[in-house]
Amino acid sequence: MHRRSFLKILGLSAIFNRLFWNEALAANQPVVAVAEGRDAAQITRNAIAALGGMKRFVKHGDVVVIKPNIGWDRTSAQAANTNPAVVKTIAEEALKAGAKKVKVFDRSCNDERRCYVNSGMTAALGGMKNVELKFIEDERFKKIALRGKVLSEWELYDEALHADVFINVPVAKHHSLTKVTLGLKNVMGVMGGNRGAIHRNIDEALADVNSVLKSHLVVVDATRVLTAHGPQGGNLRDVKALNKVLASTDIVAADAYATTLFGHRPEDISVTVAAHRRGLGEMNLNKVRIVRA
Amino acid sequence: MRKANLARIIQLLFLAVFLVLFVRTEYRGSDTISAAINSFFRADPLVVVSYLLSAHSLTWLLFPAVITLVFSTLLGRFFCGWICPLGTLLDLVTVRIKKSAPLRILKGNVKYWLLFPMLVAAFFHVNLAGVLDPIAILVRGLTFFLYPIFGHTVRSGWVDLYGLVGERRDYIAPAYAVLRDNILPFRDTFYPLAFLSGFMFLGIIYLERYESRNWCRNLCPLGTLLGLFGRFSIFRRSPSSLCDDCKACRAVCPCAFEGELLEPDNCLLCMKCQQGCRQHRVSFDLALPVPGHGPYLPERRVLLGGLLSGFLLAGSFRFRKPEAQARLLRPPGTGSEDEFLKKCVRCGECMKVCLTGALYPAVAQGGVEAVFTPVVTPRLGYCEYNCNLCGQVCPTAAIPSLPIEEKRRAVIGKAVLDKNHCLPYAKKTNCIVCEEHCPFPEKAIKSEEVEEIDRHGNKIKILRPYVVDELCNGCGICENVCPLEGKSGIEVFAVKDKSPLKAVAMAPADDQPSDPGAGDGSDPYGGTSAGKVGDPYGGGSGKESDVNRRAGAGDGSDPYGGAGAGKESDPYRGGAGEGGDPYGGAGTGVGQEVKSPARKKDAGRGASGDAPAGAGNRRKGNDGGKEVWEGENPYR
């Protein structure tokens, strides 16, 4: 092939296929988009736009799963659950990008009915067309061979596994065992069975699960964060407004950056370290491109 | 087809209301249940009379029952013929059941032998009226027996459908959601005593094969009570006996014509006789009672026998097995066991409404006197922090309806760690799931980082939980979520002193968001942390041992002052004593350690600004407290 035509094709495909272009970029250097502002919906849009927009992830007719944290019977202001405004915006963006259906669920720790209502999720997503806010149904857990370091198999939620696009939307907060809980730990919400048992070796266990269930997009809600008494909180004195939303395709990079919001270094967080070691992403923030949006 | 008269229409209406209320007695998305099945119990005269006898007091909740009683005195047993949903069900099924001869064994004074001992026993504090109350029997039969089976069957069908068609089931998911959200029980909960509850309910229906309204005329203690009150009602049927030339009433009447004479205490005022009378002779009129309808009360020996047997009954049911009592956890807000048993109707509503399926009917653990009463069973369900539905639906306030802030402080029991089972103690592995789930913002289960040697001889750090009694209300979520199989590593035990947790101990300034500008010195958390980690027992009431007094004195600004103030007889002081005095020193340690590599780093990055730096400090402060704590930890 002639060099000129090769370059032409390369250039054209880059222009016409933004995905290719972005992935070529992403392959070089992980990007974490950081949007700041008081309007949670707007900064969510900005952060996603900075990564190339939702169209980069969602194709026409896709089934999109958004996995926020709706684990606790707490209000949105108490920062134990993901900000419903952030979730709603992501759902809107996904629909705009052509998603056929958006499913939102979490295996909650408290009574799921109370969690869904009290977190504000029901109010935010109720009535949205083609958006399903669903309770977890036990029969949908499928035993999946993880062949991981500590978990050889585990029950994972089939709707999460089968999604065309899996969007992981944790809230950034303190956790008593892992210091912070972010995207890597948020996937516990699609784990079935006696998931408390993985706390014995949570770093490797989470890496095991995350190597099988990949998050195509991670949006970290740091509009307000829980700085102590996590993961449940309950006292507004432990809540700090940061007015930030992070987005990344690299779950480890997203977690690593979010960690710094709490004054920790990524290396302090063993969950992040294990995931990085296992090749799930980049935790060295010097190697990550931070894009302000 | 018989023509429907007014009584029948009203009956069906009340049955419909009953069933709707029954289904609505569940969390359906709102924190409050405005109308529940308890309305029927609040209007139930047997409930109010037995409550009055056993509790020696009255609650306004039962005011409707007093009204029912007044009207029954004036009008007779209209409740049975017009309102009682069990009676309506019997009326509906009895037409399909072929009758044999009445059971002789039920005739005579059986119903008085049920009612009198029951009421007398109630007077001597063993209130078993609810066991035989017809509405309670019906609600229990539904709650424990039919409804779970119905729910499970529908749910299994739904699950099986998934096995058959997989994801395509989603097409009809909205229809199922409507069913699930409005009709089905949300959880698959199976109850002990389900068989007995079903047996009692179905047994009453079975009795219909001997005669119609067999239960109502021969057994029902509520009916008997109303019969007694309504004996001299001023609203009655005339003629008061069968007419010699017709006697059709006997066939029409469901309840009151055993012989020639109308039994006024069994007339349900259903007015079927009036409707069925071809001669138009029957009428129901207001009239002064005519004496001479037999004795008001049954024979004296029934009365005396009832009195004596009630007294003896009360005494004979009082054995309580101590080890069972330790796990006899009552719903939040209930008083002492005695007080609770006096008031509980055993209607099963609290168990039906319980969000997480934490409440189950007592079988034998509370003794015979406690059968069917609700017991919190944490391994199956826990008391949800933000839920107070059981109190809302309790008809007699045996479980008081507490505002949510007060319910959180109401003590069910206290969590106790079992070091032989708890993973960080027994297996030297991390876990801390109990702490994670503890709903109190200040955490009644805290953790300390300790160094251990693993089996390879390496030093490892693990977090070990411990319980702070002053913050624990015994909700049981820790026991519920403990990842150990079978027996939990942490369990809730009943306590005698159920005085509410101190408000200040729970969440100081709960509704005030943090001040973003708060610097190190004024960081409110620093202080809290000092108190929290270092000194949960601080401000001991002064009646405590020296150890605790010193701890309290160590920190003058302790925001928890008084939090630890227990009663002199507080049996939990032992917990403080056990730990020795690690609490004193820790408080001072926290202040120094607010140094922050975190802060420097944050400033350097320049991205996170002030607020997160503060966050970092808080965290550090917390750690710092722990480090000092460890230094003096007598456990190591």
Image (cartoon, helix red, strand yellow):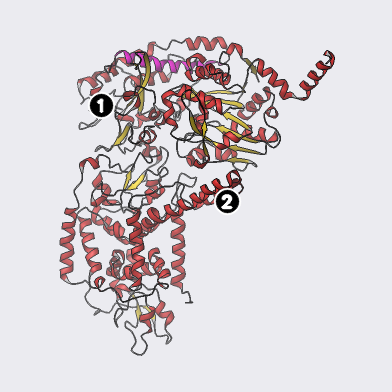
Task: Say what amino acid the circle numbered 2 marks.
Answer: Ala
Q: Any magenta on residue B615?
A: yes
| Residues at marks 1 and 2, CA–CA distance in whole angstroms | 53 Å
| Rendered residue at 35%/32% (across/down) | B503
User: Does residue B425 appear in the picture of this structure?
Assistant: yes
Q: Quadrant of residue B439?
A: top left
As drawn, is A51 to the left or to the right of A177?
right
Query: Which quadrant holds the C terminus of chain B?
Result: top left
Read off the residue under disc 2: B175
Task: Say what amino acid the circle numbered 1 marks.
Answer: Gly
Q: Quadrant of residue B280?
A: bottom left
Q: Residues within 10 Å of mark 1 (few under 14, many from 20)?
A: few
- Badges 1 and 2, same chain: yes
Residue B358 pos. (x, y %): 37, 43
Which chain contains the residue that carries disc 1? Answer: B
Residue B485 pos. (x, y %): 36, 34
Q: Residues within 10 Å of mark 2 (few under 14, many from 20)?
A: few
Residue, far bottom: B245
| Closer to us: B197 or B254 | B197
Above or below, B368 relative to B95: above
Read off the residue under disc 1: B575
Residue B1 pos. (x, y %): 49, 77
Above or below, A157 relative to B102: above
In this view, the mark in front (1 or 2): 2
Q: What residue span does the magenta drawing correspond to?
A: B608-633
Which chain contains the residue that carries disc 2? Answer: B
Above or below, B483 relative to B238: above
